[in-house]
Amino acid sequence: MDPDAIFHDSFYKFVDVADIDATAATLRDLTSALTGSLLVASEGINGTLAGSAAALDAFRAALASDPRLEGTLHRHRVQAQPLRHAAVPADEGARTAGNPAAGRRGR
């Protein structure tokens, strides 16, 4: 495998996130070697990141070490053109992707 190859990894996890800002800050630190976007909302996380295989493996391992984020569903990992940057916004509500159990609280 080419050590300079760039891979994309898309993932999501429906989980209650009580402290959105603190979770987003932690995930920003974990994505320092990656580019892409990662949305943190009260219903969970959703993102697409790009980077080296080693950087993505380290990010996935860090997610798996958090009991809330263990079992995050990663959709694909393909070699592709790099994304420009990593964005990790904190949001009160994410798109629920048709999952009514993950709807916005109080609405």
Image: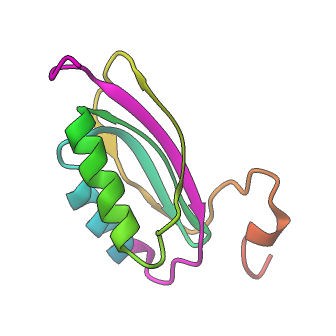
In the displayed structure, would residue 84 be above or below residue 15?
above
In the displayed structure, would residue 1 be above or below residue 32?
above
In the displayed structure, would residue 69 be above or below residue 29?
below
In the displayed structure, would residue 16 be above or below residue 39?
below
Q: Quadrant of the C terminus?
A: bottom right
Residue 17 in magenta stretch: yes
Instruction: Specify the segment rendered in magenta.
Output: 1-21
Task: Report the colour scheme.
Answer: rainbow
Residue that appears at 80% across and 60% down: 99
Residue 22 in magenta stretch: no
| Residue 103 visible at all | no
Number of labels in the image equals 0
Q: Within the image, what quadrant is residue 50 found in?
A: top left
Residue that appears at 57% across and 73% down: 42
Relative to 86, 100 lies left or right: right
- Counting from the top left corner in percent of width and height, residue 61 is at 31, 59
- Counting from the top left corner in percent of width and height, residue 43 is at 62, 69
Q: Within the image, what quadrant is residue 4 found in?
A: top left
Residue that appears at 40% across and 30% down: 8
Q: Considering depth in this image, is 106 or 102 the residue closer to the camera?
A: 102
Q: Considering depth in this image, is 54 or 95 the residue closer to the camera?
A: 54
- Counting from the top left corner in percent of width and height, residue 92 is at 57, 69
Residue that appears at 29% across and 47% down: 57
- Counting from the top left corner in percent of width and height, residue 105 is at 72, 79
Q: Within the image, what quadrant is residue 1 found in?
A: top left
Relative to 32, 11 lies left or right: right
Relative to 100, 27 lies left or right: left
| Residue 22 visible at all | yes
Q: Residue furthest front?
A: 1
Q: Considering depth in this image, is 68 or 31 the residue closer to the camera?
A: 68
